[in-house]
Image (cartoon, coloured by chain):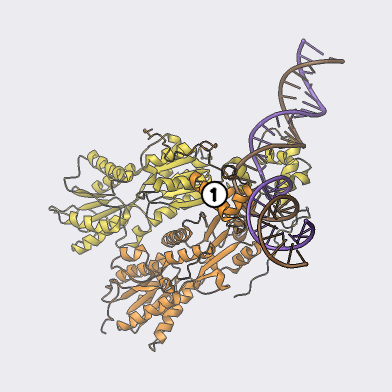
Chain colours: A yellow, B orange, C purple, D brown
Amino acid sequence: MTERTPPQDDEPQAETGFGRRRPTINDIARLAGVSKKTVSRVINASPFVQQETRDRIQQVIAETGYVPDPQARGLAFRRSFLIGLVYDNPNPQYVVNMQLGLLDGMRGSGFELVVHPCERSSPSFLADIRAFVERQKLFGVVLTPSVSEDERVASLLEEIGCEYVRVASVSLDSPAHMIVTQDRVGGVQAADYLVSLGHRRMAHISGPATFRSSHERRGGFEDGLAGHGLKLEDGYSREGAYTFESGIEIGGQLLALSPKPTAIFAGNDEMAAGVLHAARQAGLRVPEDLTVVGFDDFQIASRVWPALTTVRAPTREIGRLAGERILGKEDAKANPEDRAPKLVVRDSSGPAPQT
Amino acid sequence: MTERTPPQDDEPQAETGFGRRRPTINDIARLAGVSKKTVSRVINASPFVQQETRDRIQQVIAETGYVPDPQARGLAFRRSFLIGLVYDNPNPQYVVNMQLGLLDGMRGSGFELVVHPCERSSPSFLADIRAFVERQKLFGVVLTPSVSEDERVASLLEEIGCEYVRVASVSLDSPAHMIVTQDRVGGVQAADYLVSLGHRRMAHISGPATFRSSHERRGGFEDGLAGHGLKLEDGYSREGAYTFESGIEIGGQLLALSPKPTAIFAGNDEMAAGVLHAARQAGLRVPEDLTVVGFDDFQIASRVWPALTTVRAPTREIGRLAGERILGKEDAKANPEDRAPKLVVRDSSGPAPQT
DNA sequence: ATCCCGCCGGACACCGGTGTCAACGACCCA
DNA sequence: TGGGTCGTTGACACCGGTGTCCGGCGGGAT
């Protein structure tokens, strides 16, 4: 047991009659010489308060450092000041970036973030979410893939009457409920880039069909290729699971094809890292013999060797937008460019080998 | 806008007079023919209720699916049913594993987890934490490194009267407040293993001095070496920053030494991954020319090539313990073995090269 | 039979806010 | 001058629980 610095009153409060207790709305009312209801009006920015009264109350609030109790307020409002993050994406980097983004968007609002990972395949999946939302009387919920793509969850929240925002790669709902990521654009960028390097025989490993982003990323890639008169040949586009292991496996399959692809675009960095392993097992050099491109630009992309060329998905930005949206303080001057994926060229990509 | 399945009442409630509204304690009292206070006694397991009365109330509760409102309960208790996770560790994998562990430990308790990343160097660091804890009237707080090692935070929570648990690699507080990770043991394991492979000239990259775990992991490694009559020569032990980049940099420095170490033990996987890059830049093969061992066994360890031999830190287990501890439901039969680090041998380690 | 005590249950205030509605003064119009 | 409207404020009930305290009841001691 270590010595502790003694507790110091860093804010020696004026003697206001409530001692060290946190001030309540009653204290403020008494000190300002008004009823608690009027204080409540000031807190809630009701227009029906005289400027003079308002100023007096606000000064007392500032002097005492009063902050209304979210629990009591929530009880009266029949709604808490908590935002739920409901997710089932197993990628830690995604989860953390999303959380950080949400907190960015919620900063200074007085709301707090409650995390709620879930299992979409669980029999109690919907009941769990319902219990979570109803019990906590959540102010709002942010859904990320793949739960965000489940219509049952949206209906449930609609029914309960809980605000919600769905982060997904396509619009599935009224625009007010959607934050749409531009995965398709990222796919196009990958295609354009690979073609510009001279690649013609390319392959793709998509994420699982249960994620919309899998289709969007692949679709964008195909669109991009089509723009150059190219396409993915039969057998050169396969479904993975967004996991490292599936990247190894499917990567190995693709590299066993004849003729081999000169470039593989993976639906995320995890699978791209798997492809690097598969290439090594197949005795291929990256990028001399094989170009590998990932998607997301999570930390792993720069940790593997060679460092991955990848499409950066602005997850944290998206999270910030979701946070602002759910609190209704979305910045009108927000630049949609910020939400666009961006190609990051590193060392796993190079000119198509001469054959 | 997509079609939605219509809302279905999956739990057609008996006509109890409160309609679709969630039942409150008053409904239960009325239905059971008792006062709300008696219902409250049952909820809180007060002994002063006759078995017969208790049974009747519990049956009504079960029939109606009543769950007390945490906000109202919290208001009366002057304490919420929220657990805060306060952290400043930037490693996403650590954060997510810790969260999952905490949720494991909290499952079924009715408590929720509120995440609160923070910046220890911020001037408002302590004020932020105070505001967070006091405003939300948190039931408890879990602190993880390096905030957990800050005595000021512990004092603050003590002063506020908020339950807290500190996760750290050494005991810094009364045992009730500590979950001690066994980082030192892991360091010893690394040393024993490397010595068993025949390594004699080894180097270490520690984490930053601001993390206790840095000292523990290095200390354990030195202890282990000492057990075999070995030690880290001057200049063969250097301080990194627990980051990939610092691993590259310090790894490069160590590999420029003469004579070169035959094995490098890094304080975490991130830095070990950096060492792999440095080795490649120096034209060294791993593990033939150089053995690299990491610590943590996060995902990156198996993604890099060659896959890292590392010491697995049971972060999720630790989180579960912290969750149980703070709710006072710690499992007495918990096996302390579960908390021990464990060496995971992969491909980045091999016999010391013959020189 | 009376008193006392322990067990059990209820009435009431309270936690810290908000909703409803009525009162009040100033002002305007007739 | 009387009556209506508007802007401003407060009294009071209420949100859904818990703490305090007190009363009724049955049983054993006196």
Q: Say which quadrant the N terminus of chain A sits in.
A: bottom right
Q: Please tell me how crowded label 1 is: few (under 14), some (14-19), or many (20+) other residues with Cα within 10 Å.
A: some
Residue A247 shown left or right of residue B98 in the figure: left
A218 is higher (above) or lower (below) than B247: above
B308 is higher (above) or lower (below) than D1: below
Chain designation of label 1: B
Residue B208 shown left or right of residue A124 in the figure: right
Question: Picture coordinates of residue A199 (x, y %)?
Answer: 21, 49
Q: Residue at x 56, y 42 (%)?
A: B31
Question: Picture coordinates of residue A146 (x, y %)?
Answer: 36, 46
Question: Picture coordinates of residue A242 (x, y %)?
Answer: 30, 53
Q: Residue at x 43, y 48 (%)?
A: A128
Where disc 1 sits, the SS reads helix
Q: Residue at x 42, y 34 (%)?
A: A174
The quarter of the picture where residue B343 lies is: bottom left
Q: Residue tagged by mark 1?
A: B56
Residue A31 shown left or right of residue B3 in the figure: right
